[in-house]
Image (cartoon, rainbow, N blue to C red):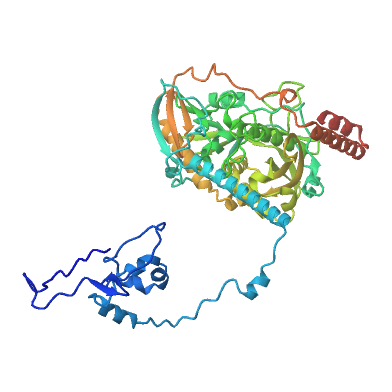
């Protein structure tokens, strides 16, 4: 039994019944009534019906056959492109349009040829490659972390935002007290523009001490024929400041000059623009005279290591590769090297007076003190105590020499292994040292120029093992003329004296009293403070631990070092067997 809706008239032209009779909504087909012009899709009761009809879809949607074909049941009720639709004409025009593309069809990546080129890898081989990539990634990450820490460490000196929070900021070499008054600060940029010429050569007022001759056999030392570095515990080395020098006091009482200093203090001033670490110099104005002093246990007594390097050193003071530990090690190496490369046969060159700091019967190191005077202007003369360490005969004349040693503690920090590069690439080794220790090398050159040395010898000393900071070997000894080496490292003598002259002129304008010149630990500048008269007199000085109380290297390395010491001692005894005096000297040295 069905319900007959009947005929409903529809007038598309207006109101009221149409002029022509209306067509029925339902048509009879096969005995059943179906809606006219409406397709019918069979479906099951369990299926979910989608949209009845989509009148809003874009006509271009039909251009994608995958979408239109995959519509399923919804495509049956899609009247967007029906012939009666207004978009049918536009769709017919779009269907006749074809895009012409001249590009060749892409070659399939996985063709027959590709299949034969890709060989399956064994699982073990693939795991090894993965582990290798992980190791390389870890190395690269560690390198980036070191560079990141380094850049943030030195960013403040280059105008950055300062050091990182997790790394301690560099400290000044002396604690700035609240009662000190800062008088002036001088940036290093002004030092580079200074120039002053002094009469050359200066006047020698007095020469004290005694010198031993240089052993020329050390010029033939190379990494394949290395020499074990000996220890000279019985010889005394003196680091006396200016006002404690009895000869300078005598010269000041005789009014020989108005400014007094030592070569170590003057070289620190002359090479100040190359310095990175903090240092300080005490300035005392007494009457019309000026004394440049250093504190007891000052940083100027130690040799810096990797001061200007881009590779940061460990911050822990107990670490054998920290800046403080390396400075102590480098100072001991330099002292022992300066005595080992001598002949030590008892033949010495004596001068006007003996060593002014040694007591009678005391064994002292081979050193001569030259008290030299320079004329700065008509009213100002400067006297400095300069050191030379050895003497040699050159064409029948005696030539003074300075002896210093560069030390290698770990090739990983410098990137250059001296044992492999010293013979074949000596220039690369020196260039690396000039990059990492430019301030130290400049100060050594300045001291050689001040002392009037004819030759400066540089020794290359390395650890027997990177973790053994007690035992060392001499790999090479190279000589340079101070003036030629100064030109090679771009050290201008006129600029050096210009810096000293500017500091002297500034201090001569000050009132009588005590002042301190401090290198800023972060910024490239120096500051002058006025301090009380009793400052630094009762200051606690941290002395380095004796060798017996220091951390010893591992037992295996100690055994190796003892064996090498025994071999070196046996070799020395066999070579020196001809002379009993030489045996005594070598025994006391070892």
Counting the numbered discs, the total is: 0
Residue beneath the point at 43% across and 44% down: 189
Query: Residue 475's x, y, as percent?
Result: 76, 45
* Side of 110 relative to 580 (left or right): left
Residue beneath the point at 76% across and 42% down: 474
252 relative to 480, above or below: above
Residue closer to the observer: 71 or 192: 71
Query: Where, quadrant-wise, is the C terminus in this rendering?
Result: top right
Query: Residue 77's x, y, as percent?
Result: 32, 68
Query: Where, quadrant-wise, is the N terminus in this rendering?
Result: bottom left
111 relative to 123, above or below: below
Residue closer to the observer: 398 or 4: 4
Residue sitting at the far front? 1
Visible residue check, residue 36: no
Query: Residue 417's x, y, as percent?
Result: 70, 49
* Side of 292 relative to 57 (left or right): right
Q: Which quadrant of the view contains residue 325?
A: top right
Residue closer to the observer: 96 or 25: 25
Q: Which quadrant of the view contains residue 573?
A: top right
225 relative to 302, above or below: below
Q: Which quadrant of the view contains residue 555?
A: top right
Query: Residue 351's x, y, as percent?
Result: 71, 33
* Side of 479 relative to 34 (left or right): right
Visible residue check, residue 43: yes
* Side of 484 relative to 90 (left or right): right
């Amino acid at each position: 039994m069905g319900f007959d809706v009947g005929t409903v008239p529809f007038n598309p032209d207006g109101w009221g019944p149409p002029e022509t009779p209306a067509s029925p909504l339902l048509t009879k087909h096969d005995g059943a009534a179906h809606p006219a012009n409406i397709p019918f899709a069979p479906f099951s009761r369990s299926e979910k019906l989608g949209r009845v009809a989509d009148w809003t879809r874009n006509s271009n949607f039909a251009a994608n056959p995958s979408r239109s074909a995959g519509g399923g049941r919804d495509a049956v009720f899609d009247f967007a492109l029906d012939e009666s639709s207004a978009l049918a004409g536009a769709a017919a025009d779009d269907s006749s349009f074809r895009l012409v593309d001249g590009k060749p069809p892409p070659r399939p990546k996985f063709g027959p040829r590709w299949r034969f080129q890709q060989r399956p890898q064994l699982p073990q081989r693939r795991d090894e490659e993965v582990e290798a990539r992980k190791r390389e990634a870890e190395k690269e990450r560690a390198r980036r972390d070191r560079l990141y820490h380094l850049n943030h460490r030195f960013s403040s000196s280059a105008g950055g935002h300062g050091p990182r929070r997790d790394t301690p900021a560099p400290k000044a070499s002396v604690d700035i007290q609240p009662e000190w008054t800062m008088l002036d600060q001088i940036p290093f940029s002004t030092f580079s523009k200074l120039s002053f010429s002094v009469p050359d050569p200066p006047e020698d007022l007095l020469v004290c001490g005694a010198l031993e001759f240089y052993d020329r056999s050390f010029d033939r030392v190379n990494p394949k024929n290395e020499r074990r570095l000996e220890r000279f515990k019985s010889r005394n080395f003196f680091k006396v400041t200016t006002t404690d020098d009895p000869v300078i006091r005598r010269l000041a009482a005789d009014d020989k000059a108005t400014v007094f200093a030592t070569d170590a203090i003057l070289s620190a001033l002359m090479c100040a623009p190359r310095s990175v670490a903090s240092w300080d110099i005490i300035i005392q104005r007494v009457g019309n005279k000026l004394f440049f002093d250093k504190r007891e246990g000052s940083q100027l007594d130690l040799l810096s290591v990797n001061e200007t390097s881009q590779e940061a050193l460990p911050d822990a003071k107990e670490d054998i590769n920290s800046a403080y530990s390396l400075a102590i090690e480098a100072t001991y190496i330099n002292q022992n090297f300066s005595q080992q490369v001598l002949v030590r046969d008892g033949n010495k060159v004596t001068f006007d007076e003996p060593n002014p700091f040694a007591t009678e019967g005391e064994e002292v190191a081979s050193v001569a003190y030259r008290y030299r005077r320079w004329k700065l202007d008509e009213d100002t003369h400067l006297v400095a105590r300069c050191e030379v360490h050895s003497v040699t005969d050159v064409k029948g004349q005696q030539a003074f020499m300075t002896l210093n040693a560069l030390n290698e503690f770990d090739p990983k920090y410098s990137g250059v292994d001296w044992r492999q590069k010293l013979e074949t690439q000596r220039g690369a080794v020196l260039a690396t040292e000039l990059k990492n220790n430019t301030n130290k090398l400049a100060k050594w050159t300045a001291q050689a120029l001040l002392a009037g040395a004819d030759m400066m010898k540089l020794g290359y000393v390395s650890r027997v093992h990177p973790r053994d900071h007690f035992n060392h070997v001499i790999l090479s000894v190279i000589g340079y003329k101070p003036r030629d080496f100064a030109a090679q490292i771009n050290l201008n003598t006129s600029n050096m004296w210009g810096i000293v002259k500017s500091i002297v002129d500034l201090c001569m304008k000050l009132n009588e009293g005590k002042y301190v010149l401090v290198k800023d630990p972060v910024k490239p500048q120096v500051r002058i403070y006025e301090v009380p008269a009793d400052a630094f007199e009762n200051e606690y000085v941290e002395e380095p631990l004796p060798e017996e109380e220091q951390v010893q290297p591992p037992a295996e390395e100690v055994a190796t070092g003892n064996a090498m010491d025994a071999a070196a001692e046996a070799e020395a005894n066999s070579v020196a067997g001809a002379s009993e005096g030489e045996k005594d000297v070598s025994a006391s040295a070892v």
